[in-house]
Image (cartoon, rainbow, N blue to C red):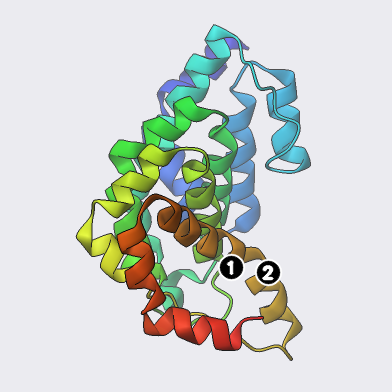
Amino acid sequence: NRLVHSWVLNSMDSWLEHFLISHSNQRVRNTAGYLLVSLVPSSPFRQGFRATHRMNREPQLSVEAQAVLHQIYTALLRLLPAAKHYTDMQQHGTMKLTTYFALLMYCCISRTEKLMFGQYFIQLWHLFHPKLSEPSIPAYHNKQALLAFWNHVCTDCPENIQLMLQNAHVTKNIAFNYILADHDDQEIVMYNRAMLPAYYGLLRMMCQQSRVFTRNLSLHQNLQWAFKNIT
């Protein structure tokens, strides 16, 4: 029903944060994600999110579908400042932001969406550091989801990497990220296998664009620790 779709789409500001992030039930948050994807008039796009969150997406959307996608994607990006309110583990646990970032990543289907992210980069950074990077939580799924999106939105997009490199606060602090290397705990091993490639992938892309950053990173205590403890 086009009228219902239009109403849901145009009233996102009244329900998006509550049901996609704030709600205490993970199934409700997931359903909110499915609802948003269902608003995009493209069957392959809708089916792909339910299947894998990443695969089987239609690379070329119709003009109408792309307009709807961009409306949703922009609304999601605008939630980044509010997302900081859900990082207190005692109050919100460690997974409140997972569906949110999975959806952001899924909506970022081309270079166009990657460039749209640029103006919101600093909000993502303020969410990551120190809210998600510093707490000593061995398996912090909010951080894993954020890093997966951040890595994706920067891949093949040097403009977004440059935003990181030209920000002194980012280059100084991005290496500070709590990592537990416990090779005997299978849960931690599996978490690190998912989180670390995204995190170190970001650092690698920064190194590829800046020799100065590469030199400074090579001297950082956390990177030296990583070479000794993460194999």
Of residues 134 and 99, which is closer to you in this image? 134
Residue 81 visible in the displayed image: no
Name the side, left or right, on which 128 lies relative to 147: left
x 49%, y 65%: residue: 143
Of residues 19 and 145, which is closer to you in this image? 145
Q: Position of residue 145 (x, y in %)?
A: 55, 57
How many residues crowd mark 1 within 10 Å: few (<14), some (14–19), many (20+)?
some
Name the side, left or right, on which 173 lies relative to 16: left
Q: Position of residue 62 (x, y in %)?
A: 60, 9
Element assignment for label 1: helix
Q: Quadrant of the N terminus?
A: top right
Q: Are marks 1 and 2 in contact (CB under 8 Å)?
A: yes
**What amino acid is at disc 1?**
Leu
x 68%, y 41%: residue: 54
x 57%, y 50%: residue: 99
Of residues 150 and 228, which is closer to you in this image? 228
Q: Quadrant of the C terminus?
A: bottom right
Q: Which mark is residue 193?
A: 2
Residue 111 visible in the displayed image: yes
Element assignment for label 2: helix
The residue labelled by disc 1 is 196
x 40%, y 62%: residue: 86
**What amino acid is at disc 2?**
Arg
How many residues crowd mark 2 within 10 Å: few (<14), some (14–19), many (20+)?
few
